[in-house]
Image (cartoon, grey):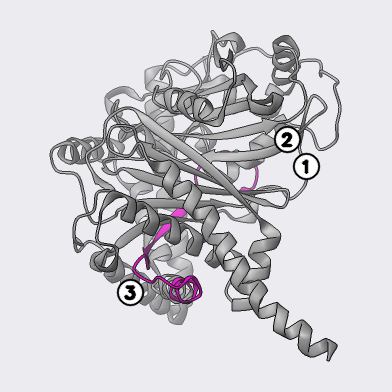
Amino acid sequence: MAAVPDGSDRLSTLDAEFLYVEDGIGHMHIAGVCVFADPPPSFEDLAGLVRGKLHLIPRYRQRVRSVPLELGRPVWADDPHFDLGYHLRHTALPAPGDDAAFRRLMGRLMSQPLDRDRPLWEAWLVEGLEGGRWALVFKVHHCMVDGIAGVGLLTVLLDLEPSEEVPDPEPWEPAPEPNGLEKVVGAWEGLISDGLAQARKALDAVRRPGEAIRSIGDAALGVGRIARNLVVPPPLTIEGSIGPHRSWAHSSASLDDIRVVRKAFGGTVNDVVLTAVTGGYAALLRHRGDVVGDAVVRSLVPVSTRHVSAEGVPDNRVSMIVLELPVGVDDPVERLEAVRRAMAEGKASHTVEAGEIVTTIGDLAPPMVVGTVSRWVVRAMHRLPQRSINTVTTNVPGPQFPLYCLGREMVAYYPYVPITHGLRVGTAILSYNGHIFFGVTGDAATAPDVDVLARATAASITELRERAGSLETPRRARRSS
C-alpha cells in the first residue's frame, strides 16, 4: 500500500489555482531563457547533466494527480513512466538565427500547453542563435514553482564553477501512487491539520489582543484598497480577450546604471526598474494610438511572502499589490518620483496582508468549492474579460555571480511570464550577474508588437542614466575647482 500523502505532497490552494484557471487559452507556465556564448555541448552530455542532477529536484519526476470527486486538492506522485527524453528537447534556428527568429521560436514554444499526464516541465536546447550563441529554455508550470523558487532550481541544475564533468545519476525507483481512498484520507487529514494550525494562530492572537486588533485593521485596509482597484478605468488596447498563441520580446540594462540612477534621484532599485517599465508602457500605448495622458495602467505586482523556513520548497509563496503606472508623466525623473510614491502607498495599503488572508481562507475551503468557482470564473471571463487590471509585472532577484553549463558561462537570462484573460501583455524582470533582463509576453493576435515595450523599457533606463550623469558633471567640476 502506498503512503498516505502528507502536506508536502498536496498542492497548496495557490498552486492548485494555477491548474484550475488553465483552460487551453491561458497557459500557466513560466520560463527562463539561458543564453550562452561558447560552442554548445552535445545533446547527450546535456541529457547526462540533467539526469545526474534530477535527484536534487524530485518534483521534476512527479506528476499532478487528482483526488476523486475533488474531495481534496491535487497531490504530487512519482511518474512510474518517467522518460527524460520526453522532457529534454533539441532544436536549432535556421541561418542566420537572428533575434527575430529566436523571438518567434519562443512564441511558438510558449503557445503549447504542458502535458498534464507527465511532470509539468520541458527544457529545450536551442542552437544557431546569432553570433554563434545557443540557449537553454526551461519551461515549468506555475503550479510547481514561483519565480524565486525557479531561480533557485536553476542554480541546482547549473554549476557555480566551470566544469565539463557529467555527474553520475543516482538510482531512483518511483514510489507507488496512493489509491483514491488514500488520497481522500490524506487530503482531509491535511485540511484538518491546516485548520488546527490556524486555530493555534488564532489562540496566539487572543493572547496578544493589541497585535491581533492591528492585524485585523491592516487586513481590512488592504481589502478596502483591493475593492477600490476593482473600479474599471478607461479602456486601453492592451486589455481584452486573448487567444492561445504568444508573442515575446526581451531587452536588458546594466545594474550599475540603475544604481547610479537610484543614488542620484533616490528610491530603490525596484523603483527605478518599475519606472523604466512605465516608460515602456507609455511608448507602447503611443505606438498603438492610445491617449497616454488620460491612461490608467494598473499592474498586478507579485510580492514574495517566502519565509526563511520555507527556502528550498519548490512552490508558490506570493501575495500581490496593485500599482498604477504613471504613464502620463513625461519627464523620466518626475515619473520615478511618481512610482516611488505609488509603491510606498501600495506597501502601506496592506494589500499584501489581505492577499495572505485570502490564501489562508482558500487553504481551509473545501477543494471542490475552490475548483468549481475558479473554473466558473474563467468561463465567465471568456465572455466578459476583466478590465480592472491591465497587466502584470514580476521582478525576481537572480544570482549576482556567473553560472555555467558544462563549462560554458551563461551570459544572459531572460524571463517569461504568462498572461491570462483580460491581460494581453505582461512583463517579467530578472537580475543576473550585474544586469537586469526584461521579458515581455503578449497575445500574438492582439499584441504582436511587444518588442516596442521591451526596447522602450531599456531606453528608459538609458535616459535616466543620462540625466543622472548630467548631475554628476557639475558636482565633479565643483570638486575640482
Q: Which of the numbered marks, if any, corresponds to residue 221?
A: 3
Asked where in the image residue 323 lies, by quadrant, the reply is bottom left
Q: Which residue is mark 2?
A: 410
- Residue 372: percent from the left, percent from the top? 22, 35
Can residue 361 be seen from the camera position used here? no
Residue 314 magenta-drawn? yes
Which one is earlier in the sequence, the residue at label 1 or at label 3?
3
What amino acid is labelled 1 in the image? Pro
Which one is earlier in the sequence, the residue at label 3 or at label 2?
3
Task: Determine crowd level at label 3: few under 14, some 14-19, many 20+ residues with C-alpha closer than 10 A.
Answer: some
Residue 336 magenta-drawn? yes
Span colored in magenta: 310-339
Q: Quadrant of the C terminus?
A: bottom right
Q: Which residue is mark 1?
A: 402
Name the mark nearer the viewer: 1 or 3.
Answer: 1
Q: In this image, 148 relative to 48: left or right?
A: left
Which one is earlier in the sequence, the residue at label 1 or at label 2?
1
